[in-house]
Image (cartoon, rainbow, N blue to C red):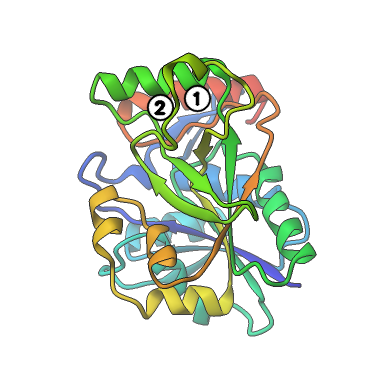
Amino acid sequence: MTAAIIVPARYASSRYPGKPLAPLKGAGGEAKPLIRRTWEAGRQVRDIAALLIATDDARIADAARGFGAQVAMTPEACANGTERCAAALDALPADIDIVVNLQGDAPLTPPHFLSDLLEAMAADPTIRVATPAIRATPEVQRRLFADQVAGRVGGTTLATDSRGDALYFSKSVIPHIPPARIGDPTLPLFLHVGVYAYRREALAAYAGAPACELEMLEGLEQIRFLDIRVPVRVVEVDPRGCDIWELNNPEDAPVIEAALACRGLE
């Protein structure tokens, strides 16, 4: 099994235009653009045959080439990271079996999350798509429900079948938890981590299918796989004490910089 990582990145963002080029300081005080920090995170994953950045913007492409990254130019019309990964398939060697989507705004993604996905797919050739999830601790459970009561989205949750394949993903808290059970650490309440590993044919099938209504309502690209009957295997991962945080708004930068410093990442 041969795998590659694609880091999809777009310049346009309603919440944070130019986000991939936003500077983030590391442990030594050096500022590097977000896209470089995510690319460097991808380089920590073992046994990867290729690592490239997929973008539609010349500014991102120029910056990426400047720090030594391989770049694939993709259409501006790509609606999400999965579509952008599919658009970059032709830039990969023909012998690549698995494509890992490491989102460009997630520089704190632990490398072992990606390795866990690849190990699961190597062990079970029937898995066409895999994605990680973290079991919610009692503290996280309470935060999720508090956010929901306040009308905020605290994270994406999911429900799986007995095989571990996803039944549904939602920005609402699923499954329903009776109030008396909240705080039970064994509950099947999982926070989804937006990283994906796809077999090549599954990614091509996604790109050839239209967006579905539930995908649009939830704002969750992975629901399209469920709509076209491509199973998504959920792999439970251990954060090992790492903070998992994406750069979605300028206010997130200090949180990420603090985590970079805590991990000793320059």
Proximity of marks 1 and 2: CB atoms separated by less than 8 Å: yes
Is 31 or 228 nearer to us in this picture? 228
* Residue toward you, 117 or 264: 117
Q: Which mark is residue 49?
A: none
Tell me how far mark 1 sits from mark 2, CA to CA.
6 Å
Left or right, 146 with respect to 235, comes to left
| Quarter holding residue 118 | bottom right
Residue 52 located left or right of residue 149? right
Quadrant housing residue 33: top left
Q: Secondary structure at mark 1?
A: helix
Q: Position of residue 124 (x, y in %)?
A: 75, 66
Measured as percent of width and height from the top left, residue 6 is found at: 54, 62
Quadrant in the picture for the C terminus: top right
Q: Residues within 10 Å of mark 1 (few under 14, many from 20)?
A: many
- State which quadrant residue 98 falls in: bottom right
Q: Which residue is mark 1?
A: 257
Mark 2 residue element? helix
Residue designated by label 2 = 253
Q: Is residue 73 visible?
A: yes
Q: Position of residue 42 (x, y in %)?
A: 62, 51
Q: Nearer the viewer, residue 11 or 222?
A: 222
- Residue 87 in view here: no
Disc 2 crowd rating (10 Å Cα; few below 14, some 14-19, many 20+) is some
Q: Of residues 199 and 183, which is closer to you in this image? A: 183
Residue at point 56% right, 23% down? 259
Q: Quadrant of the N terminus?
A: bottom right
